Image (cartoon, rainbow, N blue to C red):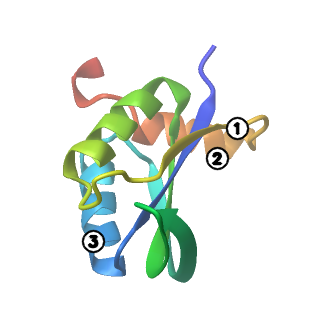
């Protein structure tokens, strides 16, 4: 049984996130992406505490396409080690889920 899935990632700018989001939706890997600008990240990287302004992207897809989404994000992401977290969705409105399924149906599925 198919389920919904979310993929969480961050980008260094809204422009880069929007470019990636357009590619994911265009390829039918995602029904929708939400881009939230203005996030501040504080993290340890290569032994130092760093601070960066980033944009969060939440990718809405079907669980069976989450791995393809992850691979696509990783292949084009500007970071050496991007945050890519696949989150299972426990419950989703049935009409919204039907829309996700319709929008992420592979083009060659007929």
Q: Which mark is residue 22?
A: none
Q: Does 62 appear above or below 80?
A: above
Q: Are marks 3 and 1 in contact (CB under 8 Å)?
A: no
| 1 left or right, relative to 72 | right
Closest to the observer, 31 or 44: 44
Badge 1 element: loop
CA gap, disc 3 and disc 2:
27 Å
> Does residue 53 appear anywhere in the picture?
yes
Residue 98, quarter of the rendered image: top right
Q: Which residue is mark 1?
A: 89
Q: Nearer the viewer, mark 1 or mark 2?
A: 1
CA gap, disc 1 and disc 2:
13 Å
Q: Locate residue 91, reporting x and y percent.
A: 79, 37
Q: Which residue is mark 3?
A: 16
Q: Does 88 appear above or below 41?
A: above
Who comes first in sequence, dot 1 or dot 2?
1
| 1 left or right, relative to 49 | right
Residue 1, quarter of the rendered image: top right
Q: Locate residue 27, reporting x and y percent.
A: 25, 43
Q: Which residue is mark 2?
A: 96
Q: Locate residue 10, reporting x and y percent.
A: 45, 63
| 81 left or right, relative to 102 | left
Q: Does 66 appear above or below 45?
A: above
> Does residue 110 appear anywhere in the picture?
no
């Amino acid at each position: 049984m198919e389920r919904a899935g979310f993929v969480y990632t961050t980008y260094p700018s809204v422009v880069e996130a929007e470019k990636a989001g357009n590619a994911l939706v265009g390829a039918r890997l995602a029904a929708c992406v939400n881009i939230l600008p203005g996030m501040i990240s504080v993290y340890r990287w290569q032994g130092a505490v760093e601070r960066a302004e980033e944009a969060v992207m939440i990718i809405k897809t079907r669980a069976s396409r989450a791995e393809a989404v992850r691979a696509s994000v990783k292949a084009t992401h500007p970071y050496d080690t991007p945050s890519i977290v696949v989150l299972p969705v426990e419950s989703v409105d049935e009409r919204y889920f039907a829309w996700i399924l319709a929008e992420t149906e592979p083009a060659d599925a007929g």
